[in-house]
Amino acid sequence: MSEKIFTLKDNTTGVAAELQSHEGTLGPEVIDVRKLYAQTGKFTFDPGFASTASCKSAITFIDGDEGVLLYRGYPVEQLAAKSSFIEVCYLLLYGELPTQVELDKFDNSIRTHTMINETMLRLFNGFHHDAHPMAMVSGVVGSMSAFYHDTMDIQNARHREIFSHRIVAKLPTIAAAAYKHTLGQPFMYPRNDLDYSSNLLNMFFSVPAEDFELDPVAVEAIDLLLILHADHEQNCSTSTVRLAGSSGANPYSAIAAGISALWGPAHGGANEAVLNMLEKIGSVKNINKYVAKAKDKDDAFRLMGFGHRVYKNFDPRATIIRDMCHKVLEKLGRKDDPLFELALELEQVALKDDYFVEKKLYPNVDFYSGIIYRALGIHPSMFTVMFAIARTVGWVSHWQEMITDAEHRIGRPRQLYTGPENRDYLDVAKR
Ligand code: SDX
């Protein structure tokens, strides 16, 4: 790996720092600033971390200019076309595509870890029926650290593997329990004879009173959406998991922190916000009004599902999801879904508008996913939960990579202090 030296010089004092650079396998090289403060007494300043590499990682690579997304080197387009979510989970966790024996063993381990502790089920009775599913899921996932604190030695490789299988296997069950709680319907137990996506849909939609027939189109669509949302480098929620986990905290609580971060509308909450936005726009004739609002600096309105910190080209996932949208709506006899028509027209208007072109704002992964979820009968309040189910394997993979990195330290950024200088306490009578 070629190393270069960058000199950073303070032209006022002449003090210079010699900083080493490092090159990775792909993507921009990095300037190592770990010695900067010691050499100069100065910090770097990068709110939002747009120019900061927080770690080394071998899991996912994104080229935002070229619209490239690789999971362990494999293009997401190829995995979407040829793989399955359970196989992608193995790839992300273990770094290589599994042999058939390895895949069968892993699939069986996941299927036999899908049930949750019955005491955990009773936690849902503590939530009001109209609690947001994301609030319930993040709370119940956090409670897993209360159930598994004594079998969670993070320095033990087998404990880490059991944790990773447990949390990937149980997220759909916890999500389904939250959904059934909002519906006032009985919880449906997981079934070990069903594959991951079929089991998820069965827990969401079956009821004890009648048989439930799985639609293969729905199963295929869910499996594809889970693949496309599985990981995405050092995004907000993944960085949250890494930071929370860096203190040595119970990993279930680190995942719960990631779920909370994902919920924000600027991040994974955008898929629910897109649908709310489309319903608010209501008709093609209102598109120009809302595009103008999105461009207005004085208006807080943004086109949800557009823009990305890294992609300054099409989000490759959005293209795949848009095509899957056509297929799902066609097969479900919903091809004239007015919301989908509105979304297609909004995309065309925005992509021709100078503001979006100049700022390189393209549809992202969240723009079309909600339309598919809605067509499959999933409630908008569950859209970000679907994202969390998929991203859990990415969060766990990054947590494991961090914990097993001998160089990892507790994450503790510094700041540019802009508060008051040192001052003495004043008695209330003198204020
Ligand atoms: C996800 O990081 C990931 O990888 C995330 C994710 C993943 O898989 O983990 O890909 C999933 O979170 C996708 C993003 C979902 N969020 C949304 O769709 C919400 C709408 N998008 C915006 O909030 C925004 O684009 C972000 C949050 C996605 C990106 O924000 P940045 O990188 O901080 O960009 P910015 O806010 O600095 O915007 C740059 C400019 C600004 O204008 P100027 O101040 O330069 O004049 O573009 C404008 C913004 O006002 N802008 C938008 C816009 N997004 C950015 N203007 C109108 N509508 C938008 N959607």
Image: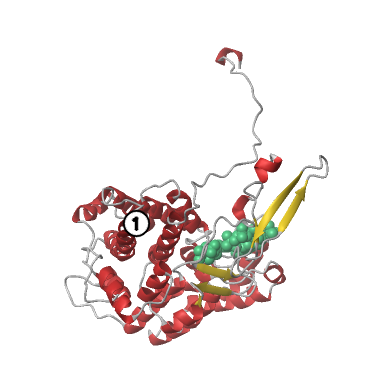
**SS for callout 1:** helix
Tell me: residue 305, above or below residue 46: below
- Say how many tags the image has: 1
Q: Nearer the viewer, residue 276 or 156?
A: 156
Confirm whether residue 203 shows in the render. Answer: no
Kind of residue sitting beneath label 1: Val
Q: Residue at x 43, y 70 (%)?
A: 95
Residue 175 located left or right of residue 208: right
From the top left corner, tell me how far across and down residue 81 is, in percent: 45, 84
Please state, as top left, top right, bottom left or bottom right, where the N terminus lies in the image. Answer: bottom right
**Ligand 1, what quadrant?**
bottom right
Residue located beneath label 1 in the image: 137
Q: Nearer the viewer, residue 200 or 291?
A: 200
Q: Residue 10: which quarter of the image?
A: top right
Q: Residue at x 53, y 44 (%)?
A: 412
From the top left corner, tell me how far across and down residue 229 is, in percent: 45, 69
